[in-house]
Amino acid sequence: MSEPLWEPSDERIAAARLTAFIDHVNTELDLAIDGYPALYDWSISERGAFWGAVWNFGGVIAETRGEVTLADADKMPGARFFPDARLNFAENLLRNASAMEPPSTSDGSTRADDDALVFWGEDTVRRRLSHGELYDRVSRLAQALAAMGVGPGDRVAAFLPNMPEAIIGMLAAASLGAAWSSCSPDFGVESVIDRFGQIEPSVLMCADGYRFKGKKIDSLDRVARFLGRLPTIRHVVVAGYLSEPPALADFRKRLALLPDRPEPATATPSGTAPSAAAPQVHALDDLYAAHPGGDIEFAQLPFDHPLYILFSSGTTGKPKCIVHGAGGTLLKHLNEHQLMCDVRPGDRVFYFTTCGWMMWNWLASGLASGATLLLYDGNPVYPSPTVLFDLADAEDVTLFGTSAKFIDALDNLEVDVRSTHDLSSLRTLTSTGSPLAPEGFDFVYEHIKRDLCLSSISGGTDIVGCFVGGNPIGPVWRGEIQARGLGMAVDVFDRDGRSLRGEKGELVCTKPFPSMPVGFWNDPQGTRYRAAYFERYPSVWWHGDFAEITEHGGVIIYGRSDATLNPGGVRIGTAEIYRQVERLPQIEEGLVIGQEWDNDVRIVLFVRLAEGVALDDDLITHIKQQIRAGASPRHVPDVILEVADIPRTKSGKITELAVRDVVHGQPVNNREALANPEALELFADRPELRE
């Protein structure tokens, strides 16, 4: 199209944090940067200066920063950002309150009185915590964890809904220097063991249950089952969600009856030998009551000290345990929140996520930018398709984060948010999880809000952030991610490592950045880490996305390159087919794979149909015509089949590779990583795929 869908007003550009940052670097470093493209080029050519400016502009709190911002800058991996710094992640997120903060306004109130966390549990639970209350609860829980022997290098695991206690637990662990790792409570027993069994936590936080579509779902039965196989866990902290206080008598009895757990392989870093006996169970409220609170003694630790252990999806084997450092995570999120998403002090930030997706970690860091976090747990369309926009209106949300799948679902349901909701405070809508189709862009501006910066963003668990994302002072073009991320030397390569423009290829990053993983767990030589990202192109991060850099300087993601189709040797991104399929009201969703056939590859499209629709010859012809007209003749599937369900990971991403394995009779190594593994059976031994 010849015109952008949206452009910021002069007033909006003037008020943006990105504009303030440009003024900051121009003044402090005597530069003459004008606009995002020039800032991006400088952020890549002068990475040490750029990340130093992010540190200063973001007001990072640290015992020391050190003089060096980037050492071994030419090594990838191997570069070190702020090698002499010592800081604490939790201290930076709790900057708006302390135990003894004096009044800061004429009426005696303080910033500590403002909302830090607002929680909605579907239509049943409403809670809010001020910054002062958050600080107090983190202080009390940190004291309790310290009394359990938790210290730097230990791991605290969580099996929690997206509720305030997850934020509190993470901050308490981080204040002590322990690493935090979480799963959402819909994970199955084997999925939990595959993850936590590798990292050997000493403490588990969980809730008594969660809510979904109005139903109460118990968590403690599954917790009891997996605790028997996690011998390093010595303490279990239970938060009440279904009942307050949580009913723990039966849970304690069940744990007491567990057979002795296997002897753990190692002692905790803090020196406390773990026990094979049943762990001690504590109600969280009892721990709050047993400790006095007060000022938190934040452990001052190196920049790369482990903060989070995140997990790959695990659909091709045991999940990779990806270790992220405190300083890199903090700087990356300050950059993305303030400069690329225009998060300002006092803003109210929402992202629909679970504790099993890295967007939860991304959301949590909003506290460091002075934002209030809006937490929602449950079904995103229960009790109505607009419940998340009810939250946005009621709580004056300024940034609304969701997935492309949610936007597509609203489109299919013909929801017109603009006619039912005000959304006057909403400035930014972000979308991730899968590529947002051009029609998704249209839907947002036609049916949600017209004056809105729609920032499609893309990155991943691997970097606990984004490679590409928003530009609040630039235009939004239909179907395009606005920009490559500041400080991220993003490029698109062909198979031979040549840079491409206006053509599809492999998304890469050619220079180091602070949120590269510290490493993988139990990979002391870095062998698996280097194999995952640096074997395709030496000294260049290969991310595995099929992408294109556009004439506007934006980016289009066409799907995972390992799921790319190759009929006749021509590479086709699966997202190009999905964009056409999702335009048809007869189809709820689709999944496409390449099937090895007759010494070539043929395209097979599986479709889940709308209620009452039959996949007859007329509809098959219509689907093929739509794909031919909207994409190209090469994109037209050879076979179109109906399925009742589409398998997904726990974070909601469709699993093309698992389906491809099933179709080819190959084993799927880790079905427990899927939210609905039973759906794979719908693709096995299909007679139509033998013809």
Image (cartoon, grey):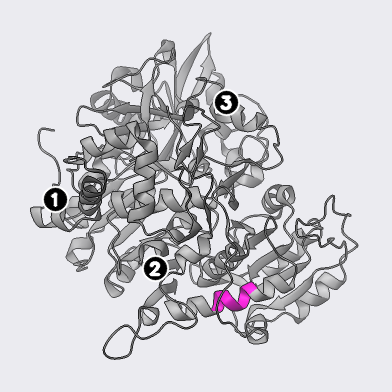
Secondary structure state at the residue bearing disc 1: loop
Q: Which residue is mark 3?
A: 687
Asked if residue 344 lies in the magenta stretch, the reply is: no
Q: Which residues are magenta?
A: 137-142
In the image, is 301 to the left or to the right of 106?
Answer: right
**First in sequence: mark 1 vs mark 2:** 1
Mark 3: few/some/many CA within 10 Å (<14, 14-19, 20+):
few
- Position in image of residue 428 (x %, y %): 26, 56
Residue displayed at 68% across by 71% down: 145
Q: Is residue 176 visible?
A: yes
Above or below residue 239? Residue 475 is above
Q: CA distance from mark 3 to mark 1?
A: 54 Å
Q: How many marks?
A: 3
- Position in image of residue 54 (x %, y %): 35, 50
In the rendered structure, are the residues bearing label 3 and label 1 in contact, judged by CB atoms less than 8 Å apart? Answer: no
Q: Main secondary structure of the magenta part?
A: helix
Mark 1: few/some/many CA within 10 Å (<14, 14-19, 20+):
some
Secondary structure state at the residue bearing disc 3: helix
Return the residue found at the far top. 599
In the image, is 111 to the left or to the right of 230?
Answer: left
Front residue (pair 247, 163): 163
Asked if residue 140 lies in the magenta stretch, the reply is: yes
Quarter of the figure with the N terminus: top left
Q: CA distance from mark 1 to mark 2?
A: 25 Å
* Residue type, numbered disc 2: Leu
* Residue type, numbered disc 3: Pro
In the image, is 673 to the left or to the right of 475?
Answer: right
Residue displayed at 88% across by 70% down: 257
Q: Which residue is mark 1?
A: 8
Q: Which residue is mark 2?
A: 374
**First in sequence: mark 3 vs mark 2:** 2
